[in-house]
Image (cartoon, rainbow, N blue to C red):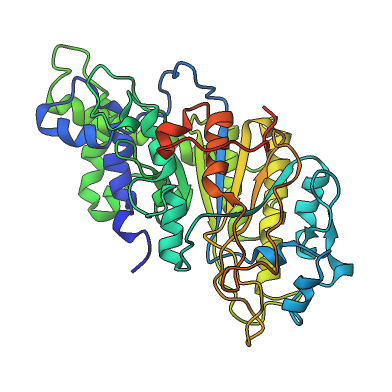
């Protein structure tokens, strides 16, 4: 069973429940009021939220499978690295050496030249040794921990709680009232499933793989549904005293879903301003950039690059790990070039994480097994470029694994407080120290 199957929203569910609930307000008919309160999905043209800089956008890039942090941000200045990885270590002469803040003795995998270019341009902050206490080496459980911001791996997603917190105190456990402020536009994930990180108690994410699938699908089920649907959307919402009727609600539902669908599909049909690499991640990022350039009000986007579970033959310069790092680096460079061409780059902060790193020593198959701490990347013009934190010791280990230096919730708190302008304690349940990784 897929990790997110139990929480996934199908395209049809999205069209008829998610964006459609944008029109849910005090006029919702009683028979739909309860479900509307459970899924208040606001339209893409809602009013502003006091005290929040809605011009800022967060992009989350998930590296699924457990990225090997030691061969990503390479501690080439430490002989223990080469002793532990005799056949898969990146040769010192091939490492992309870094300079500046905290960069002594570390560099990037040679496949990440595009990211090193961003680093040199002041667009990349590397946070070393990120993890959490009592680490879990299960893909599923550790990903749930990162997604929820809770070491039990239970509850709503950390970004879902952020969206809830923007809506009449829902993030504090209140049920909300009809007079409360509407939540911000829902987060968008590019992919088949809606990630747990985006799922709140009141606000739910939407997800789609391609723009062509982001549409009303009734005619594909039964062609006879097409004309009635068109009649509803052509008619528009009533202007008389029947605004509270069931028919009025359904009419608004269809209208909101159609308008939202058409707007997003129109946005992603536009050609990007730069050429993207030919990779799945690049295609996801091109869609995100298109929606941003088109003026979408969405504040959080989520994309995924999988395949990082490198248990064997990891050391090749053209192997799976190197190719994945190259895809990531080149896609991110193209994304920010695209945004810069449209003068949108200063609006977008990117967080890149993986559920865990790998063990320090290579295994007998020339790969690496599940480990613990790993680096996190923050990208964008607003970052304090450089390497943040102390690299974990390669000799003072916990059963062969790195000891984390920075709790991942410090990263989350920094983003929530300094970029998304929200109280991180409400979202994370307690106060975490902020890092000096953003210059805002």
Q: Nearer the viewer, residue 323 or 356?
A: 356
Rendering quarter of residue 157: top left
Residue 423 on image: x %, y %: 46, 28
Q: Nearer the viewer, residue 67 or 194?
A: 67
Residue 105 on image: x %, y %: 83, 58
**Vertical relation: 243 (above or below) 431:** above
- Taking the view exactly as shown, the residue that stands out farthest to the left is 31
Q: Is residue 269 visible to us here? A: no
Quarter that holds the N terminus: bottom left
**Position of 363 compared to 3: left or right?**
right
**Position of 289 compared to 195: left or right?**
right
Q: Nearer the viewer, residue 152 or 111?
A: 152
Q: Residue at x 42, y 36 (%)?
A: 427
Q: Residue at x 33, y 25 (%)?
A: 169
Q: Residue at x 52, y 38 (%)?
A: 432
Q: Residue at x 51, y 31 (%)?
A: 296
- Taking the view exactly as shown, the residue that stands out farthest to the front is 396
Residue 41 on image: x %, y %: 33, 33
């Amino acid at each position: 069973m897929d990790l997110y199957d139990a929480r996934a929203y199908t395209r049809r569910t999205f069209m008829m429940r998610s964006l459609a609930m944008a029109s849910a307000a005090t006029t919702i008919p009683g028979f739909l009021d309860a479900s509307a309160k459970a899924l208040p999905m606001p339209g893409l043209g809602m009013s502003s939220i006091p005290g929040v800089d809605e011009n800022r956008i967060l992009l989350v890039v998930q590296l699924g499978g457990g990225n090997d942090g030691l061969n990503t941000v390479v501690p080439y200045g430490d002989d223990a690295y080469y002793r532990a990885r005799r056949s898969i270590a990146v040769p010192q002469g091939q490492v992309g050496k870094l300079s500046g803040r905290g960069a002594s003795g570390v560099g990037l995998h040679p496949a990440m030249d595009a990211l090193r270019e961003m680093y040199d341009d002041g667009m990349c902050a590397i946070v070393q040794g990120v993890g959490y206490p009592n680490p879990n080496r299960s893909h599923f459980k550790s990903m749930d921990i990162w997604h929820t911001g809770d070491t039990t791996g239970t509850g709503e997603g950390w970004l879902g709680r952020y969206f809830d917190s923007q809506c009449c105190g829902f993030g504090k456990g209140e049920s909300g009232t009809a007079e409360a402020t509407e939540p911000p536009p829902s987060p968008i994930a590019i992919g088949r499933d809606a990630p747990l990180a985006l799922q709140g108690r009141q606000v739910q994410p939407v997800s789609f793989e391609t723009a062509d699938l982001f549409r009303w699908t009734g005619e594909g089920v039964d062609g006879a549904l097409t004309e009635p649907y068109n009649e509803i959307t052509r008619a528009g919402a009533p202007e008389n005293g029947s605004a509270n009727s069931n028919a009025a609600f359904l009419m608004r539902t269809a209208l909101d879903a159609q308008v939202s669908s058409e707007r997003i599909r129109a946005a992603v049909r536009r050609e990007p301003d730069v050429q993207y690499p030919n990779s799945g991640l690049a295609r996801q990022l091109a869609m995100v950039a298109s929606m941003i350039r088109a003026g979408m009000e969405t504040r959080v986007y989520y994309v995924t690059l999988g395949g990082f579970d490198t248990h064997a033959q990891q050391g090749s310069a053209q192997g799976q790990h190197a190719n994945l790092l190259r895809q990531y680096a080149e896609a991110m460079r193209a994304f920010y070039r695209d945004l810069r061409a449209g003068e949108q780059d200063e609006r977008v902060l990117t967080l890149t994480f993986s559920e865990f790193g790998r063990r320090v020593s290579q295994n007998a198959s020339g790969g690496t097994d599940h480990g613990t701490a790993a680096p996190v990347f923050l990208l964008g013009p607003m970052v304090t470029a450089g390497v943040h934190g102390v690299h974990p010791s390669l000799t003072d280990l916990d059963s062969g694994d790195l000891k984390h230096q920075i709790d991942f919730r410090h990263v989350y708190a920094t983003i929530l407080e300094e970029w998304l302008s929200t109280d991180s304690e409400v979202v994370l349940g307690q106060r975490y120290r902020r890092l000096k990784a953003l210059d805002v």
